[in-house]
Amino acid sequence: MRDPEQLYTVDEDLASETGDVAVLLHLVEGFVDAGGAGEVAAQHLTERFDAQRLVTFDVDELLDYRSRRPAMTFDSTTWADYDEPRLVVDLLHDRHGTPFLLLHGMEPDIRWEAWIAAVHQIVERFGVKLVVGVHGIPMGVPHTRPLGFTAHATRAELVADHPSWFGSVRVPASASALLEHRLGRWGHDAIGFAVHVPHYLAQSSYPQAAMSGLGQVEKLTGLDLASGGLEPAAREAAAQIDRQVAGSQEVAEVVAALERQYDDAVRAIDGPSVMTDIPTADEIGAEFERFLAQQDGDES
């Protein structure tokens, strides 16, 4: 394997002023991010706080352009714009001025091990004590109940206060999941929060999921990430969903069934956050497909 340091460049002037940074938050756009939990969170953070570009990865070495073609804009007679893919680490400061690092952009398609080794170099160079990730996963839960989450970490002590809703399962890997796994093997603390997003909303932007995930990061790290700033967008999304559910008796009935299932599970375990079984295709059926089609129509 070539030197992982060849995969990225560092703004040395900024690095010389940075010193140690306790937390690296990674919100990479990858395999699964239901409700855009990580993507919306990254957008919120970069818009709310002054982001200084500390590290830039060479996406030409990491991206399969034919698998995920970036968008271009054709305007009348010319190619006017190109959505240039990026994978970067920014230096931000929370509302109290505490520095933290934000790794965001496109998940690498190739050279995962080399990229993870590069992130490991960055973690060690800047004295990172804790690496934290957030993303959304689709679950059989209703949007009318509090969002739950699954916490996972490199050491059991890091998630001792959080219930486990899964046994042993095999799932397709992601670069972010492998990053957490490798960091643990190398003796670094890493934790992730998978927010449970109603899976009939998995393909939509769901700010509630980002707000919930950032809230967990705030509790864990003590950073003030202004997660409450997502509240207006969350209220607007909730109102839109309520209007769409009210307009479809079939969807309303499915949501009501999920509410009963959720409430029964809460009563059974007497806990605030639950993971219920994902409904089968027969249980969801055409109602959810119609619901998603309505959402796509509203967004176009």
Image (cartoon, helix red, strand yellow):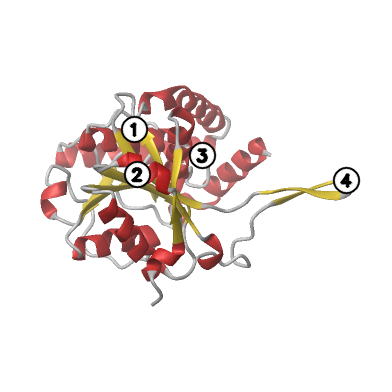
Q: Which residue is mark 1?
A: 145
Q: Which residue is mark 2?
A: 16
Please state the horizontal and vertical placement of residue 195, each as a whole percent of the image. Answer: 34, 44
Label pair 2/3, CB-CB below 8 angstroms: no
Q: How many marks?
A: 4
Q: Mark 3 against mark 4, which lies toward the viewer?
A: 4
Q: Secondary structure at mark 4?
A: loop
Q: Quadrant of the C terminus?
A: top right
Distance from label 3 to label 1 (Cα)?
18 Å
Q: Mark 4 against mark 1, which lies toward the viewer?
A: 4
Distance from label 3 to label 4 (Cα)?
31 Å
Please state the horizontal and vertical placement of residue 7, each as a whole percent of the image. Answer: 45, 64
Question: Callout 4, which amino acid?
Answer: Ser
Q: Which residue is mark 3?
A: 205
Along the viewing direction, whichever of 172 and 51 lies nearer the viewer:
51
Label pair 3/1, CB-CB below 8 angstroms: no
Tell me if I can see residue 172 in this picture. no
Q: Secondary structure at mark 1?
A: loop
Along the viewing direction, whichever of 225 and 214 lies nearer the viewer:
225
Q: Which residue is mark 4?
A: 76
Circle 4 crowding by C-alpha within 10 Å: few under 14, some 14–19, many from 20: few
